[in-house]
Amino acid sequence: MRRAIEFGVGLTLLLMLGGCGMSRYDFEPNRVYLRSQENITRVELSPVQQQDIQDILEFWFGTADEPRIPSLVDIPMDDLLDLELLHAAAGPVGSEEDGTNFGVYRRNCAVCHGITGDGIGPAGAFLNPYARDFRRGLFKYTSTLGPMTPPTDQDLRLLLERGMPGTSMPSYRLLADRDLDALVQYVKYLAIRGSVERALIVESVDELIDAEDRLVDVAFDQDSPERIAKALTELTPLISFVARPWLEASSRVVEVPPRPADWDSPEAIDRGRALFVGQVANCATCHGNDGRGDVETVDYDDWTKEYFDPQNPRRVREYLALGALKPREIVTRNLRWGIFQGGSEPEDLYQRIYHGIPGTPMPAAPMKDADAPATDLRLVSDDLWDLVAYVLFLSKSGDAVVDGSGASESLSGE
Amino acid sequence: MNEKASRSTTGKDEVLLDGYRPWPHRWALLVAWTTFPLIWVGGLVTTYDAGMAVPDWPGTFGYNLFLYPWQTWLFGPWDLFLEHKHRLLASLVGFLTIGLVIVVYRQDQRRWMRPLAVWALVAVIAQGGLGGARVLLVERQLAMLHGSIGPGFFAYCVALCVVTSRWWHQQKATPGDANGFQRVSVLAVVVLAYIQLVLGALLRHVPEAASTMYFEVAVWSHLIGAGLLLGTASFVAILMIRGPVGDASFRWLGWVLLLLVGAQIAFGCATWVMKYHWPTFVVQTPITRIYALIEAQGMLQSVIATAHAANGSLLLGVAVLLAVRVLRVYRGSLDPKPLAAVAAPAG
């Protein structure tokens, strides 16, 4: 009995104090990506080489409490990131007498997205879909062309205000304007920092042949900042490489053309249905003819595929041990529910169909140029509007049966 | 012990009251009733993460706590309002507890009541100091400790209420054959309710840098605890409702206990869904359409989370009420025999 009590008290203390020990708010190294690169190249980085990556990152980007922006000659980093706002987002939670908040990221986001932005916050394992890992700089709901183009500030801001219906991602529209801006800046910061880390990892496994080789020959805890900065100039192109697309994102926005007149007429819906099940747009292969998304497909998103090979599922254990989350199959959206993670305005859906959803199997629609010959079967913007009309029609038809050719009629018969 | 007897004021029964005085009981009630809002304002402070809204302690932005201009906090930012209100209320509870000690010393003739009252004061001071340390050290783990001692203090106040009550004085000790199992289950409800509060505090104060494992263990423990609590509380409640209870208040308390446990489980599920969305096993079912979009720091989210915490404390309070009373009456078992010996007071 006494032992049992002792055990209980010990366990309680451990839980409480253990929690204290865990309140060190450091960025976590990207062990999973490092291992995947090591496995590809069959090079193993020594502890010193791994530590170098973290030291370089800290020199450039600071810590979770004290963010910093690296300065480059070729890219105006201060235009890209606002240090003052980063400071509002980083660090411990607090606020001033006039209501100015600090630690906005830690207070609102870190439980799920993690201090590092790796999507592995304490509650991360419970979510479905998992919280976004920012470190690839890859985002699903963007207005910019091409899957590799980062979102604009406006995209991120909109997403924070709107939230993602149907997921654990809340709407933050009740937050103060400045706090939202701070969060946008901080997400960009974490994404850029994470991508630079990945670049450093690739650089390391590619360049360091011997265990004694190092990316830079400095002692981070002894040398002067000037000397370290000088030694690191050789590596700054890695930052430029990551940062430039972010800087150029706003020039790559694809404007959504205005809705045509009668864009949601029954004829438009019928045309949309034909496209939906047709060979070119090919939506039905994944979403099913009636948009229920119950077609048997087994697939994973790009974040997962980086450490999980469905052909070889057992190898994932190695990564799970490093903290990776258990792979979750991606689910094709059931369009009948009318819950759209990227927004349910017609313009939002147009963007979704146009760009696809980067990082997922959902492809960008095959578009043709305005001057393409009529024999070119690919789509034009009016076709996309027809698809939007059909998707919205599906979303409003609930569980009613929608098949047969005249889609719009079969519903009015309900 | 002074055996000076007094008459029941209602005059309905002829039970001799063993030194009953109304004031200690009234003060204890006052302390308990002030502590209850205090803990749920404290819960709100957590919900809105307002713990650091006032960065100094015991002062308030350099002012004395009581002299801090009321316009500033009453019309100031919400988190400042919460934190300051929490501090003011806490001071009030502190003063009331001092009052309780004085009243008990002057009025209650049972010597053993004195240390009990002093302990309440010690606890209140320690709890205040802990709250201050949480602010000064910016340490969330202390917030967790602070958050789990709060309801404990409330439960203690409830126990004091029972011990000082007229009801307590009316009971006659009845030696009986101890039915350990039944007494243990009443106590188990208390212990489980408290463990659940601690685990809940653990979940709400989860450090952002904690591992997923930490959170998972906390969640599963909280769920298993909920199951055990549901089981034991239902058992005890049914015992009270159906059991050979001479005193109708026990039956009534049984129903209250059952109701609170049910509400608590509903609030708990709602709290999760409103914060983290539907759990994985229902995420792909049409239920998800009901509450598709979470709103961070939304009204509903905060109200439900606070209701869960407040109801948890209430549950603990009722469990303690029941336990102390059961231990008082059923010195032995829930067998009707010893009960017959107890003079049954009106309602």
Image (cartoon, coloured by chain):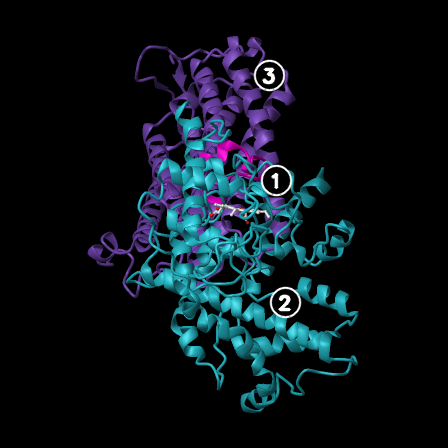
Mark 3 nearby-residue class (10 Å; few <14, some 14–19, many ≥20) = many
Q: Colour of chain B?
A: purple
**Residue position for label 2:** A29
Can residue B281 be seen here? The reply is yes
Cβ atoms at labels 1 and 2 below 8 Å apart: no
Q: Secondary structure at mark 2?
A: loop
Mark 1 nearby-residue class (10 Å; few <14, some 14–19, many ≥20) = some
Looking at numbered disc 1 in the image, what kind of residue is underneath it?
Answer: Ser
Total numbered circles: 3
Estimate the x, y position of residue B262 in percent, counting from the top left: 49, 26
Estimate the x, y position of residue A161 in percent, counting from the top left: 38, 53
Q: Secondary structure at mark 1?
A: helix
**Residue position for label 1:** B221
Q: Secondary structure at mark 3?
A: loop
For discs 3 and 2, the disc positioned in front in the rendered view:
2
Residue B333 is marked as 3
- What residue lies at 39% left-to-right and 16% top-to-bottom? B16
Looking at numbered disc 2 in the image, what kind of residue is underneath it?
Answer: Pro
State left or right for residue A273 relative to residue B209.
left
Looking at numbered disc 3 in the image, what kind of residue is underneath it?
Answer: Ser
Image position of A51 with respect to B339: above or below: below
Cα separation, mark 1 vs mark 2, equals 30 Å
The lab-note entry on whether marks 1 and 2 share a chain reads no
Can residue B113 be seen here? The reply is no
Cα separation, mark 3 vs mark 2, equals 61 Å
Majority secondary structure of magenta residues: helix
State left or right for residue B59 relative to residue A235.
left
Residue segment shown in magenta: B272-289
Q: Colour of chain A?
A: cyan
